[in-house]
């Protein structure tokens, strides 16, 4: 790779360090050095420890749990780089927190995803690189360039590698929101498609009652953008097993996995759960180790950063059918 080592700087925030290391290893460059410290009163400070004047800077940080602290750290990073005269600052946000607050679905509620976009722009970011946003239209909340990647290529590659073990396969979308993506998986993996009608009852509970499509005697692969409390995939897994599926596997880009998720998955018929490292693991996913496959999006982010730095196309990264987004 032809890398301009001196002009490209990649930093990892506290929720992006592992990915920053992977990206830098992929690009064969050293990581930017910076330090985030906590004052006794809870305030954060970011100190960039090298010259960034006139450089093309990327900060990798997922705005995952603790969401507000990680978000604030990223904003402070951007401010710090701006005041240190970086030429261009790209926020690399593998998991974009608050993306599910993307519209007013009842009266007197905020659109926090838009507020977060405004905050990034106010802090001085020049562009954003993100992955599998909960709603692709969040790109439009920014009036600056947004490159929206999808991890489906990484996930599909994995399933292509074990395709012969999957036998007669049906891809199941656990709700209507993910049908487009599920359909792309079905084409890429030469499988059938089924859809579940899910109703959300509360933040933690869902009811999945109706299934459109055939799962009897099949291997079911459920695909979603994220797994949070795991209500969605566990309810869907129960339903497909009740409908006669042979086995069920779940795949998602973002392992949010909070609240009751671990217990729900452990007590579910899901035999394998495939996720990416868009949110740091750090032992958090230990309870699921017996059925967990974690795939790295580091090389994908590395390629995208390389292309942005060299003004090359991002869409050219995706093979046909694996660039579909929600
Ligand atoms: C919903 O539209 C999303 O794609 C996920 O299905 C949902 O947010 C997952 O949440 P949980 O795991 O808490 O059911």
Image: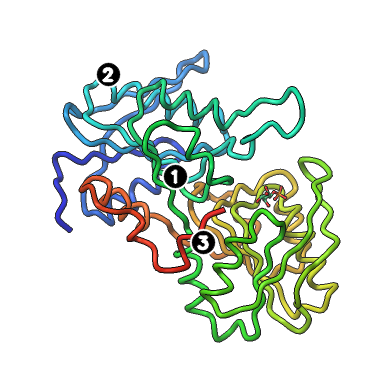
Residue at x 59%, y 58% (from the top left corner): 252
Q: Nearer the viewer, residue 273 or 170?
A: 170
For residue 279, the mark is none
Up the image or down, 62 lies above or below 243; here it is above
Q: Residues within 10 Å of mark 2 (few under 14, many from 20)?
A: few
Q: Residues within 10 Å of mark 3 (few under 14, many from 20)?
A: some
Q: Residues within 10 Å of mark 1 (few under 14, many from 20)?
A: many
For residue 130, the mark is 1
Residue at x 38%, y 36% (from the top left corner): 91
Up the image or down, 202 lies above or below 241; here it is above
| Picture quadrant of residue 53 | top left
| Picture quadrant of residue 103 | top right
Up the image or down, 76 lies above or below 225; here it is above
Find the distance from the CA under tag 3 to the CA under tag 1. Answer: 19 Å
Q: Nearer the viewer, residue 290 or 142?
A: 142
Residue that badge 3 annotates: 294
Name the side, left or right, on which 323 lies relative to 59.
Answer: right
């Amino acid at each position: 790779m032809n890398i301009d080592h001196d002009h490209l700087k990649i930093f990892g925030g506290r929720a992006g360090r592992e990915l920053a290391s992977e990206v830098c290893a992929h690009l064969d460059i050293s990581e930017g050095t910076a330090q985030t410290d906590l004052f006794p009163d809870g305030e954060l400070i970011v100190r960039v420890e090298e010259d960034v004047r006139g450089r093309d800077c990327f900060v990798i940080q997922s705005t995952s749990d603790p969401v507000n602290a990680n978000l604030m750290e990223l904003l402070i990073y951007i401010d710090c780089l701006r005041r240190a005269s970086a030429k261009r600052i790209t926020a690399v946000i593998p998991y974009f927190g608050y993306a599910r607050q993307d519209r007013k679905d009842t009266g007197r509620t905020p659109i926090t995803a838009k507020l977060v976009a405004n905050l990034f722009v106010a802090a001085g970011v020049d562009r954003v690189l993100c992955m599998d946003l909960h709603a692709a239209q969040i790109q439009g909340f920014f009036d600056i360039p947004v490159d929206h990647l999808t991890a489906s290529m990484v996930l599909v590659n994995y399933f292509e590698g074990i395709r012969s073990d999957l036998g007669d396969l049906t891809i199941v979308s656990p709700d209507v929101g993910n049908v487009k993506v599920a359909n792309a998986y079905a084409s890429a993996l030469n499988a059938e498609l089924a859809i579940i009608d899910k109703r959300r009852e509360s933040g933690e509970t869902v009811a999945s009652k109706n299934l459109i499509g055939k799962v009897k005697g099949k291997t079911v692969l459920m695909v979603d953008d994220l797994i949070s409390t795991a209500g969605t995939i566990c309810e869907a897994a129960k339903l497909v097993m009740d409908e006669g599926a042979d086995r069920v596997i779940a795949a998602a880009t973002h392992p949010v996995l909070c609240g009751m998720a671990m217990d729900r998955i452990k007590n579910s018929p899901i035999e394998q759960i495939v996720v990416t490292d868009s949110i740091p693991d750090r032992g958090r996913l230990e309870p699921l180790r017996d059925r967990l496959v974690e795939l790295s999006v580091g090389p994908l982010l590395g390629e995208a950063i390389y292309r942005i730095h060299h003004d090359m196309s991002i869409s050219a990264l995706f093979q046909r059918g694996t660039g579909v987004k929600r």
